[in-house]
Every structure is written in structure tokens, then in C-alpha cells.
Amino acid sequence: MKSPLPLKNPHQDQQIFRHRVWFAVAFVVFCFLCLLARYTYLQIFQYGQYNSAADKNRIRLQAIPPARGYIYDRNGVLLADNYPVFTAVINRADIENLEDTLKRLVPVLDLTLDDLNKFRHRAKSTRKTEPLAIKLNLNEQQIARFSEVKYTFPGVNIETKMTRFYPHAELFAHVIGYVGRINEKELGELDKNAYAGTDLIGKIGVEKFYEDLLHGKPGYQYVEADAHGQILRHLGQTPAIRGNDLYLSLDYGLQSIANAQLSGRRGAIVAMNPQTGEILAFVSNPSFNPNLFVTGIGHKDYNNLRDNPDQPLYNRALQGVYPPGSTIKPMEGLGGIHYNLVNWGTQIYDPGYFHLPGDAHRFRDWKKSGHGTVDLNKAITWSCDTFFYVLAYRMGIDNMHDWMTQFGFGAKTGIDLPNESSGLYPSPKWKMQKRKSKWLPGETISVSIGQGAFTATPIQLAMATAITANHGHHVTPHVLRESKGPKPYHVLNAPDGKVEFNGTEQDWNNMRDAMVNVIRSGTGGRLKIGLKGYEIAGKTGTAQVKSIAQGKRYNEAALDERHYDHGLFVGFAPADSPKIAVAVILENGKHGAAAAALARPMFDYVVHQMEKNPIKPAQSSITGGLMTAGMKPQEISEQASQTNRPAASPAPSLASGEE
């Protein structure tokens, strides 16, 4: 028989239930207190940290790129301006799949592979929160296409940014240079904080050399943005500091005249103030439109420039190296006086040739019949090669090298432009190092008339001419005259050395008079026509492009035009108180007199007009501040080029063989 089940104990059940309820309540209260304590800790002790983290989701720090400094000529003519363009900007912090976004943007914004690569390289080296430009200078069609699909591109916006514009296009291209998109190499060398928000940097010319002055200092602003990256409001900012404005020594009028003289020809002209070293004109022709490079030049345009046989991208005035020909004879003649090898009364007889003792090879004078009895003055006036053959034989290449390098040959002048060539004044040491062979006596003879391995740049010839005009006082050529802005910069406008010369002041005066005779009655005689109240001191030169065999004559008719001799001219004026020193290179110009003719309008302008009534652009030309975003630089340049510029002077007719 089974035992009966025990009866329930209601009191015990109630007690157990109450214990469970109190335990549950206590557990809930404990959890609530823990949660309250956590909330208290976060709100009071961790408020600053989490408040900042929350703000980062909606408040952003954006860089404000500084406005680039303007560039003016000596009279305040604007040479480099800023104007706004529409720019596609990507905020990577608002984009989940960047590569997918870029892929979809290609047909909308007409992105090229170069655009994509530049963006990717820039993205690797910048903060994710920093907006980056993907394409500059959007046109109306691109803006319209993007506006239709903008809702599918969170984090991509179109903003207005300032870019560079050169109102006078090709006129100053080789000296002002241009800016362009920052590339990968430049990005690795830059201070990223200093270039935050900046897309452009100086590539060549003044824009590159004075990048630190022109760039300025970026600012920053706090903005509130929504989930799509759209800016809702500005919360505060530290303003950017714009770059310095540069006032160059260049004169618009003289630059225009020099450019007109070279119109349709290949060559270079450099004009400088021999007293201060200021560059007054700096022309290399043919030139190019720098506005094409600012927002990215197309492949077709670049290929056309690169493959052009006239090489418009080549800066002949700064990088072109040419045999200087007879233009160096005044400096060389002074070297003969320095070494007491000749004086102003020394005479030689010129039969039309010279040969070294024991050698039958004849070094010919440009005048086949010779110049007869010749002293130093006549040798300069009529550019007698034989006189300088004799002088070089007496002087020797080592003395010639030591003397001529004092005038700046064989070394960079130090002009404030990048990528200058040094030219070459050869020596036995140089030949042994570079060519592993000994110097030959005949090479000395060739160097004496600016041929052989001797090469010089137009800027070197201008500086050497200025030193001669200064009676040996050295000046360093420079294009910057004054800098205005937050960054102080001092410009040296004074002689910075002197040629060691054993002669007298009268020797310098005599050489000046001999160079005046070149213009009055010698090889540059056509320049004297119509002179008004001043004298020009000058020296012509001819440099062979194609060598002529011994015993053969120069036959111009049988040569291709690009094998004609180069024409050269150096000079200064007024001869007794120089305001301008000029070097002219006329490629394949046949004779030095042709180059000299190009300099005459420049002398007249500087002596009679530049200080009192300088030429300036026509009032109708675009001078900055009127451009609208989205306008193509090419279109603006076409408008800006409608200015009154002097016409080129016709080349003079020349007798065969004229120096």
C-alpha cells in the first residue's frame, strides 16, 4: 500500500516566491545602477572625448587653399592672373567604394587615365577627410551631366576653385612659365600641410623659381555636413594668407618689340640693364600658349608642341647653346691687353688666312682676300679673324680660359630662372676628362673666334656684354624687381664683382669706341641709319651650323635652310652711358648683320620712350578680375591676344660673306 502524498505548505511557497521576487528586483536595481553609473561616467568623465567623436561625424576641418600671388611687369601690367573654374571634388570620407565611384564618374566627367592616376597618387599621401579635386575646369556639358545623376554620387561635389591665367599667352611663356597639377614626385617632396587643398604648383619659369613666394599659406574652416557630404553651415575659420605679388623687371613694350622682331623666325633675344642686372626683355621664339598646361594639356595639343620641328617648348634664351662666333672678340681683345700681348698700336698683316708654325693647314678669315694691315680697333670694327688667330696663338688656351670665364662663359649666370644651361668654354683639362684625348693647337684657333667646342647661351652673351659695358663690373642677371606680400625678399640691384684686369679705364673706353665703329662703319653699319642723338656699341657674329671642308667655299644655295649659318649680335646703348645691353641669336639668319637689325628698334625704345611713355596693352585686353568660372583658357587667351603690338622689322639685304 502506497504512502499518501504530503500536503502543500502555502506559507513556505509564499516565502520562496517572495525571495525570488526580491532577488529579481535586486538584480534589476543592480543592473540599473550599473547602467546609471556607466551613463554618469560617459556623460561626465568622458564627455569631451565622445562629444568630439560625434562632431567628427558631422563637423569637418577643411583646408582653404591660398590665393596665388599675381605677377606684374615693371609698370604694373598684369602678366599672371587668377580666375575661377568649376572643379569636381571628392570627399573620400563619404564614399564606401572609391574605385566604383571613380569608374562611374569616367563617362560623366570625361575623366582620362591621367586624371585617375593623378587622383590615386594624391589620395595615397593625404588624409581621408581632405577633399581632393578629380577634374579641373569642367565645361557646361560635364556640369549638366553630373547634375542629372548627382544623387547617385554621395561625396562628390562641384566647387569653384581659383586657377591660373596668363593674359598675354605666348608673349611671356618662356620667362613666366606656367603652373600645373601636382604630380607624384612633387607630392613626395612637398610639405603636405603647406599645400593642403592646393592642386597647382609652378612647373617652369618664374612660377617655379619663386614658388615659395607665390604660393602663400593655407587656411582652415570648420563646416557642418550632412550624410551626403553637403555643407550645411560654416562654423568658423582661420583665413588663408595669399602669396606675394611679384613685380618683374620685364617691360611689356620692350618684350613686345623683341617678340615682333623674331616673328616667324627661330631665335632668342635677351635685353638687360647693365647697371643693375635687371632683365628688360626675354624672348624665345617660337613660343607656346602656357594656358594649355594649367588644367592639363590634352595629348593632341602636347604632341603637336613636342613634335614641332621648330621646338616651341625649347627655351632658347636660357637653355639654347650656340657657338658665339665673333661676338666674343671684344672680350678676347681685352684679354690680350690684360696679358700684355697686344696694345692698341699692335699691328699684324692679314693675307686672308693664318697657319700654325710647321703646319700647312690654313685657318681662313671670313674675308677671302684678307684685311691687310690690322690693329685691334680695325680687328673689332671689321671682325678680322686672322688678328684673333694670332692673338690666340700667343695667349694659349689656358690663359684664354682663365680670362674668358671671368665674363661668365662656361658657367651658369645665376639668373633667377630654373633649368639654365651652362654652355662650355673648353680647356685641355675638360677635353681629357670628357673625351680622353689631348688638346690640339688648332682647337685654340677655333675657340678664338667662338667656334669649335665653345658654346654659350643668349643670357651668357647678354651678361658678358653688360660686363664689358660696365668696364668689368659684374652683375648677376635677374627678372624679379620687387616682391610685395607677407614674405620678405631682398633683390640685389648692384654690381657683385669685378674682372681682374691689368689694363686701364682708357682700355675699356677704347674697346667701347671700337664697338661703336662696328656700327658706324663696320660689319654692323646698317644700324647707324637714322640714329637720333645716341651711339650704339655692338659686335656682330656668324656661327657655322654645317662645317666646310678645307679649300671649299660656303655655298648657301646648296644648303638646306636649317643649315644656314646662325646670325648673332651683342651691343649696348647709349654707348657712353648704357641703359640696355642686348644679345640676339637668329637661327639660320645667315649673317650677324641680320641679327643686329632686330636689335635696333629695341635700342630706340629704351633710349627714347621706355621711361617716359612705356608701351602698355590696349585697354580692351583682358587684365584680370573679369573671368567667369568654366570659361576655357584658350578662349580667354584669344581675347587677350587682341592687343596692339609692334610689327616686325624686315631683314636687311646682305652681301655674301658679310659678318
Image (cartoon, rainbow, N blue to C red):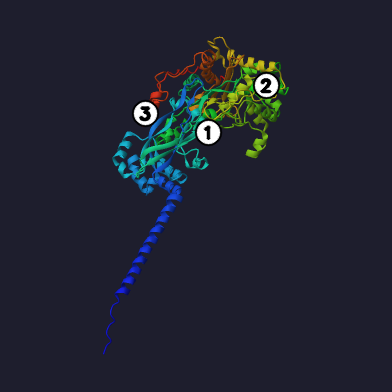
Quadrant into which the N terminus falls: bottom left
Q: Residue 289, how many percent across, how many down?
A: 43, 29
Residue lying at 31% horizontally and 44% vertically, measured from the top left: 152
Query: Dots 2 and 1: beta carbons under 8 Å?
Result: no
- Residue identifier under label 2: 334
Q: Residues within 10 Å of mark 1 (few under 14, many from 20)?
A: some
Q: Is residue 493 left or right of residue 40?
A: right
| Residue for point 53% across, 18% down | 599
CA distance for labels 1 and 3: 27 Å
As drawn, which residue projects farthest toward the bottom? 1
- Label 2 amino acid? Leu
Q: Nearer the viewer, residue 613 or 43?
A: 43
Mark 3 or mark 2, which is nearer the start of the sequence? 2
Q: Is residue 643 above or below residue 205?
A: above
| Residue identifier under label 3 | 628
> Quick one: label 3, few (<14), some, or many (20+) residues within 10 Å?
few
Q: Is residue 654 visible?
A: no
Q: Nearer the viewer, residue 626 or 579?
A: 626
Q: Quadrant of residue 357?
A: top right
Which marked residue is nearer to the observer: mark 2 or mark 1?
1
Residue at image mark 1: 212
Q: Secondary structure at mark 2?
A: helix
Q: Is residue 577 above or below residue 191?
A: above
Q: Residue 141, how many percent across, how many down?
A: 31, 35
- For this view, does 303 lie left or right of residue 416? left
| Left or right of 445, for residue 266 | left
Look at the picture and state if 545 lies above or below 227.
above
In the rendered structure, which amino acid carries the disc numbered 3? Thr
